[in-house]
Image (cartoon, rainbow, N blue to C red):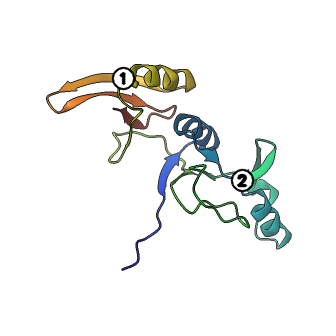
Amino acid sequence: MTPLHWKLVIDANDPHPQADFWADALGYVVEDNSAHIDRLMALGYVTDAMTVDAHGRRAFRDLIAVRHPDDPYDEETGTGLGRRLLFQRVPEPKTVKNRLHLDLHPGPGRREAEVARLEALGATVLRQVKEPGGEWTLMADPEGNEFCVQ
């Protein structure tokens, strides 16, 4: 079997600030889909109401992705072909604990500095965890999605 390409899709009330947070948090880049959107608009498939201005370029209003800067991407659409997170607008707010979350690994001795950096970006510390199997910091992104810093 050929391995499958995948992306992690995260529901968001406002996808663009979430993408900006996670791009900064991970050192990823926000995808530029503007040329693709322009082509779809010229064909009548996308309207102005379906787009926003993000970072000085046209973007889909209801979804945006971030990708690892070293991974390949489709130059025609701007869509990443490797490690990526896609944020999609949903009408309801987050109400329960995540069933899936990211663990960030900044490296030995760097957790405290990384937690402080993420707090400066808008994350919140939920609690410090110390268990026989290890230590980590449980945090929440600006929309309340939990993640851990190892």
Return the residue nearer the eye: 104 or 142: 104
Task: Identify the disc placed on residue 4.
Answer: none
| Disc 1 element | loop
Q: Which residue is under mark 2?
A: 32
Q: Residue at x 51, y 23 (%)?
A: 117
Task: Judge the density around disc 1: few (<14), some (14-19), many (≥20) Cα neighbours within 10 Å.
Answer: few
Kind of residue indicated by mark 2:
Asp
Give the quarter of the image for residue 120: top right
Q: Is residue 58 left or right of residue 110?
A: right
Kind of residue indicated by mark 1:
Gly
| Up-down relation of residue 130 to residue 4 (above or below) | above
Q: Position of residue 87 (x, y in %)?
A: 55, 50
| Disc 2 element | loop
Task: Identify the disc placed on residue 109.
Answer: 1
Q: Position of residue 41 (x, y in %)?
A: 82, 66
Q: Position of residue 1 (x, y in %)?
A: 36, 80
Q: Residue furthest right?
A: 42
Q: Earlier in the sequence, mark 2 or mark 1?
A: 2
| Up-down relation of residue 108 to residue 74 (above or below) | above
Q: Residue furthest left?
A: 132
Count of marks, rendered view? 2
Q: Residue at x 50, y 49 (%)?
A: 11
Q: Nearer the viewer, mark 2 or mark 1?
A: 1
Q: Is residue 48 left or right of residue 124?
A: right
Question: How far apart, in angstroms, are the residues tagged by discs 2 and 1?
Answer: 35 Å
